[in-house]
Every structure is written in C-alpha cells, then in structure tokens.
Amino acid sequence: MSRHGLLVIISGFSGAGKGTIVNNLMKTGKYRLSISATTRSPREGEQDGREYFFISRKDFQQGIMENRFLEWAEFSGNFYGTPREYVMEQIKEGCDVILEIEPQGALQVKRKFPEAGLIFLTAPSMSILKERLTGRGTETEEQVARRLSQARREIEKMHEYDYIVVNEDVAECTDKVEQIIEVMHERSCQKQDLISRFREEAKLMNL
C-alpha cells in the first residue's frame, strides 16, 4: 500500500532551536523542505528554487488573487509565501514536507490545509529561553527583549498546535519530532485509501 506524504509545520520561539532541529531532520534524507516564494532580490550565493523561488511583485500579487499560496505575508516591503503547487506536488509523490514558519503563517496554512500537522518547539522555560538568546551573543539587549516579547504573544497560539515538544537536548528533540511525524501517518486523514478499500470489501461481501 502506497504511503501518502504529509505536510509538517514546525514553529517555535526564537531561541528554541527550531532551525537546528529542522537541519537535523533534513540530514536524514527522509524529508523535503518547503521552499518559499519571495519578491526580494537574491542575495549573493542564493539560487532560485534552492533558498527561495524569486518572483516579481506583480506575479506574487497575481498568485495571491489566484489562491496559489498556502500562506503569505509582507515583511520590510517584500512578500513571502508558501507556494501551494510545490508543496502538493511533493506530497503527491509520497514525500513528507517540512515547513518551518512562524505561528501566524502556520495557522493560515492549517485553515487552508487541515491535514497538515503542527509541531511547536519550545525551551524548557522562559528563563532558559532568555539565557539561550543572550548566550548567542549575536543580539543586543533590545533585540533580545523584542524576541521575548514576541514569544509572549506566541504563547497564546501554542494551544492551537497538535504537538508541543520541549527542546532540552537537540538529539532527543530531533528523535521525538521524527516519532511524532511517524504517528501523523496513522491519522485517519492519511488513511482514506484504506477506508475506501474496507468499504469496497464490505460491499463485495454483501455486508
């Protein structure tokens, strides 16, 4: 029996380690990474179709009108969005697609594609989250404060996720996320072919 691909959305607080976890998942070779479309210009070393699909503002706006994005948003004067066609093609091929995105976009996708599975990654506590952000040494106190303020707002969206995973140890967290993805494959929405087969068998047996 063929295995259906699924869309796995991973979000989390800044400093929770979601980028590291996603990178670990991709190293396994078992998943495809969703590629976003953007209207910003490519940076040095970036390639179309690898980091992003680079498209014009006019084409992006046309895509919005034609419902070609699972979600989209505008940041700093540029549009960013998740192309529906690319994701659906990968899923149709039986691939599990990983989409790393912030909660606002994740919940947009969930409304348009209810079969998607949502995972939220968090540090063990807000104090540890602050320690991690400060310990990176890449941001000012003001930037850390902004990220913590954003985390406070994101707390109110955590209950809308299917799973919440605490990242205490990167290797253990990666394993746990992989286990969750396997469980997602057992949901009824992933078993429609099986359900249809049972219906046909029951009909043939005159039950």
Image (cartoon, grey):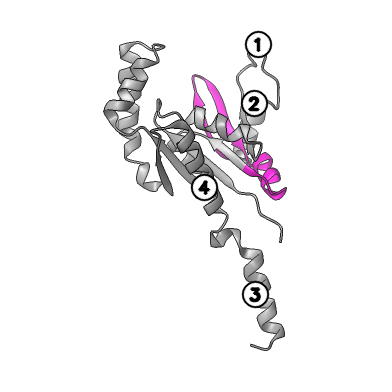
Residue in the image at 64% along x and 34% along y: 62
Q: CA distance from mark 2 to mark 4?
A: 28 Å
Q: Amino acid at mark 4?
A: Gln
Q: Which residue is mark 2?
A: 52
Q: Give left or right: position of 66 versus 116.
A: right
Closer to the camera: disc 3 or disc 1? 3
Task: Indicate the quadrant where residue 189 lies.
Answer: bottom right
Whole-percent x, y for residue 126 in the image: 28, 30
Lower position in the chain sequence, tag 3 or tag 2: 2
Q: Which residue is mark 1?
A: 44
Lower position in the chain sequence, tag 3 or tag 1: 1
Whole-percent x, y for residue 175 in the image: 51, 40
Which numbered marker is on residue 179? 4
Q: Amino acid at mark 1?
A: Glu
Q: SS of the residue at dot 1?
A: loop
Q: Give left or right: position of 162 versus 114.
A: left
Q: CA distance from mark 1 to mark 4?
A: 37 Å
